Image (cartoon, rainbow, N blue to C red):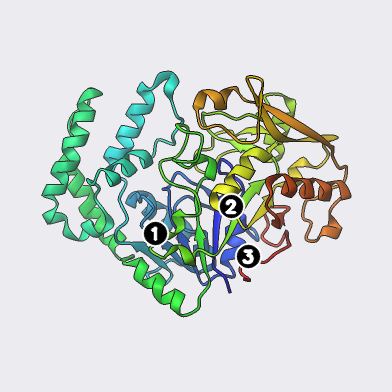
Amino acid sequence: MANVTVIGAQWGDEGKGKIVDWLASRADAVVRFQGGHNAGHTLVVGDQVYKLSLLPSGIVTGTLSIIGNGVVLDPWALKAEIEKLTGQGVEINAENFAIADNCPLILPLHRDLDGLREQAAGSGKIGTTGRGIGPAYEDKVGRRAIRVCDLAHLDALDAQLDRLCAHHDALRAGFGQPPVDRAALIAELREIAPYVLQFAQPVWKRLNTVRKAGARILFEGAQGVLLDVDHGTYPFVTSSNTVSGTAASGSGLGPSQTGFVLGIVKAYTTRVGSGPFPTELEDDVGQRLGERGHEFGTVTGRKRRCGWFDAVLVRQSCAISGVTGIALTKLDVLDGFEKVKICTGYRLRGKVLDYFPAHAADQAEVEPIYEEMDGWAGTTAGARSWADLPAQAIKYIQRVQELIETPVALVSTSPEREDTILVRDPFVD
């Protein structure tokens, strides 16, 4: 049996939660390998709705769930999320949940800096969630991060605090803010340390044991490829690599173990926050997509921008991440449209492009080239086989996979786990 890596192939919010939950019920371990609590998954299991932002989706089904070293961890957000899920009847303990002991921490000073920068940015705002993810990653690569393992050695933290505060105090002074209160920071860490340390361990070692036992591992990414710090719509991106290759470095297992790469793709396109969006619809059609798709962020509650499916972007994402097959979600949102459109290329200053350019000015200026198709009058909601789909909906799916040069592995037709058309099982070699 194969392992599976799940990534978003657009700007995030593609419906990964439902797909990961469906796969997690068949996996032996689920590993979150990048991002922070700026990501959101909404899981619908029977009558229960679970909203996750940090914990791997497998935790709801009792599957071994691991936060890998590629994640930046807010220990207070972790505690709050665990307490909320425990209140919903989810059992979380050291047997079914683990945190990499080399995972960097998001501290209150990171949240402070995130907010101060966005307030001062003016027209240069990136649209962060303000949760400190970017500054925490900066400290990681700047070699001044406090990590989970440091929580067990708080009395020996002076040298790291010197490096950390030398950096942050200078930045805070520039914003007219007082220096970091080191004593208060240590006190907060001392209070939360026992809670986090009960789950901390070298997860690469545990995963290696799981792998050798022949278990099926599901690697779970956050956000989407178009928000990747290298390959996304820079600078309007997240602060980590969201591509499938990060599953190896962000978990401690080698690249040969990441298996089938499943790209989650919404049947139209959405984006939260600032940045280019070639197919954005600022009209009644965009409004209709947003209302029918309930397009509000799980974490932020922000309204998502909506537009037609962009095959150029998804083809690029699939190529960069080596996507084996896609999971097409929210097809039912397109039910009832007389016509539907797919972007097949761009015009930029008289030239036709079959890719999304790297420069922000070019990204903002491209004009989409559309292919129009007939819509369908019937409903796709709740369909569990091809026979349940209107003929024109099947034609739409077939055209999507032709244009993105990647086959459809499954189709999701509602938030319910069972409402899934399986074309190819990602867990089977």
Name the quadrant containing residue 304.
Answer: top right
Is 316 situated above or below 22?
A: above
Q: Is residue 125 left or right of residue 353?
A: left
Task: Report how far apart the C-alphas of labels 3 and 1 lie in the structure.
Answer: 22 Å
**Mark 2 or mark 1: which comes first in sequence?**
2
- Which type of secondary structure does the marked residue at label 2 adopt? helix
| Residue 405 picture location, percent across and down | 69, 49
- Looking at the image, tell me whether mark 2 or mark 3 is earlier in sequence order: 2
The reply, left or right, for residue 368 in relation to residue 384 is: left
Q: Is residue 48 visible?
A: no
- What residue would you read off at disc 1? 68
Mark whose residue sits in front, 2 or 3? 3
What type is the residue that disc 3 sits on? Answer: Pro
Q: From what the image shows, is residue 132 above or below residue 147?
A: above
Q: Residues within 10 Å of mark 3 (few under 14, many from 20)?
A: many
Q: In the rendered image, which residue does mark 3 sit on?
A: 426
- Mark 1 residue crowding within 10 angstroms, few (<14) / some (14–19) / many (20+): many
Compare marks 3 and 1 and give the one earlier in the sequence. 1
Spatial CA distance of label 2 from label 1 is: 18 Å
Q: Nearer the viewer, residue 301 or 338?
A: 338
Instruction: In the rendered view, tell whether residue 317 sits above or below residue 99.
Output: above
| Cα–Cα span, label 2 and label 3 | 14 Å
Which amino acid does the dot numbered 1 rest on?
Answer: Gly
Q: Residue at x 61, y 56 (%)?
A: 18
| Closest to the observer, 372 or 274 | 372
Q: Position of residue 2 (x, y in %)?
A: 57, 70
> SS class of the residue under badge 3?
loop
Point out the image quarter for the N terminus.
bottom right
Residue on which the image places disc 2: 16
- Tell me the residue at 24%/60% (across/down): 149
Residue type (three-letter) at the residue carrying disc 2 = Lys
**Extreme bottom residue here?**
213
